[in-house]
Amino acid sequence: MQRCIASTRRRIPPLFSQCRRLSSPPNQAKDGNLDDQVLVEGRSYSRTAVLNRPSSLNALTTNMGVRLKKLYEAWEDNPDIGFVVMKGNGRAFSAGGDIVSLYRLVGEGKFDACKEFFDKLYSFIYLLGTYMKPHVALLDGITMGGGAGISLPGMFRVATDKTVFATPETQIGFHPDAGASFYLSHLPGYLGEYLALTGDKLNGAEMLACGLVTHYSLSARLNWIEDRLGKLITDDPSVIETTLQHYGDIVYPEKRSIIHRIEMVDKIFSNDTVEEIIDALENEIAVSSDSWCFSTLKKLKEASPLSLKVSLRSIREGRYQSLDECLKREYRMSLNGMSKRISSDFFEGVRARLVDKDYAPKWDPPSLDRVSKDMVDQYFAPLGECEPELQLPTMQREAFV
């Protein structure tokens, strides 16, 4: 069942000299300092990028996207660096994009700043997905939305007993983005549709079982892994693979895990429309009174009806698209979704769940039967001459594959 979702890798240049530690430890930085939102730890032949907004669960900002891209481009061109590691400071790897800040930016009429956020973040994700050198993401703690986007396209992904993964965007009137339509659509069966529509969580063992991550380790062992990686003098992925396996743990999903319900997930979520998915759940409930069907149905009915339809189409399209094609489409969807031209569900969802926290969003349209095909189509429509599409250096980077 395990599947690698990393992109094709290119030849890695040789290594020559040793390097030094480049910045102070994470606990010495402050959230408010923009330069300290991503720290750097230097090792002999590697670099570690440390997401460093612990009080905000390392929620991603425009500045972080810019800094990550600049660092990774420099490291890719540096023959003294063999591989790169990414981790988070605190109890999260990254909870995703700083959605509340985006909500406020658009509310203040600063839509260009919002566009810049998506441009910088998606551009970095594409860079990582086509990265020349081995990459190790240590997903210790909360890893959601954009946090998954900036890590899962890399070569190696390590989950722990503290990892919590989810793409909960339909609950805030949005859609799984940051490359989610690419990696979710590549999961076994229709698990991607299930995760995208319900926002259900996976733990580290479940991520390993379905192929979202390549390795699993107890959180307590991560210091050993980092120490060993820091001593490696290599650019060879097989050497890094051996190290991760040596300190890894064998783990299996619990009996109640969604992984053991793949046949039921496929039966329900292989249906063509959200309405048919809900009908299938209700039919199962009528026959078996399955508690999983009850909880799944509840999650779908709490989500934005428009977001459910948009997200299902996005995952289905992602199954036949490359990473860059998914990112370009998601960029279009994100800007169209935040423009309020189609609906204000994003603002209502963020208000209800993250700002006022009354957990009672008033979706518009309020039900699936009121969501027209035209509304969904508008999410996927070109941005127009005044709003350029996402530009990715596909010709330059793919020429070296």
Image (cartoon, rainbow, N blue to C red):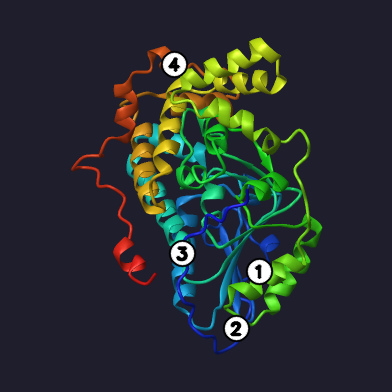
Picture coordinates of residue 215 (x, y %)? 68, 58
Helix, strand or loop for disc 1? helix
Q: Which mark is residue 19?
A: 2
The amino acid type, in three-letter code, at marker 2 is Cys
Q: Are marks 1 and 4 in contact (CB under 8 Å)?
A: no
Picture coordinates of residue 291 (x, y %)? 71, 20
In the image, farthest residue toward the right: 220
Q: Are marks 2 and 1 in contact (CB under 8 Å)?
A: no
Q: Residues within 10 Å of mark 2 (few under 14, many from 20)?
A: some
Q: Which mark is residue 351?
A: none
Q: CA distance from mark 4 to mark 3?
A: 39 Å
| Residue wearing tag 4 | 368
The relative height of residue 231 versus residue 327 in the rendered view (above or below) is below
Q: CA distance from mark 3 to mark 2?
A: 28 Å
Nearest to the observer: residue 173 or residue 234: 234
276 sits to left or right of 401: right
The relative height of residue 97 versus residue 4 in the rendered view (above or below) is above
| Residue wearing tag 3 | 8
247 sits to left or right of 55: right
Helix, strand or loop for disc 3? loop
The amino acid type, in three-letter code, at marker 4 is Leu
Q: Residues within 10 Å of mark 3 (few under 14, many from 20)?
A: few
Q: Earlier in the sequence, mark 3 or mark 2?
A: 3
401 sits to left or right of 81: left
Picture coordinates of residue 115 (x, y %)? 35, 45
**Residue 346 in which image quadrant:** top left
The amino acid type, in three-letter code, at marker 1 is Glu
The amino acid type, in three-letter code, at marker 3 is Thr
Q: Are marks 1 and 3 in contact (CB under 8 Å)?
A: no
Q: Earlier in the sequence, mark 4 or mark 3?
A: 3
| Residue wearing tag 1 | 241
Q: Are marks 4 and 3 in contact (CB under 8 Å)?
A: no
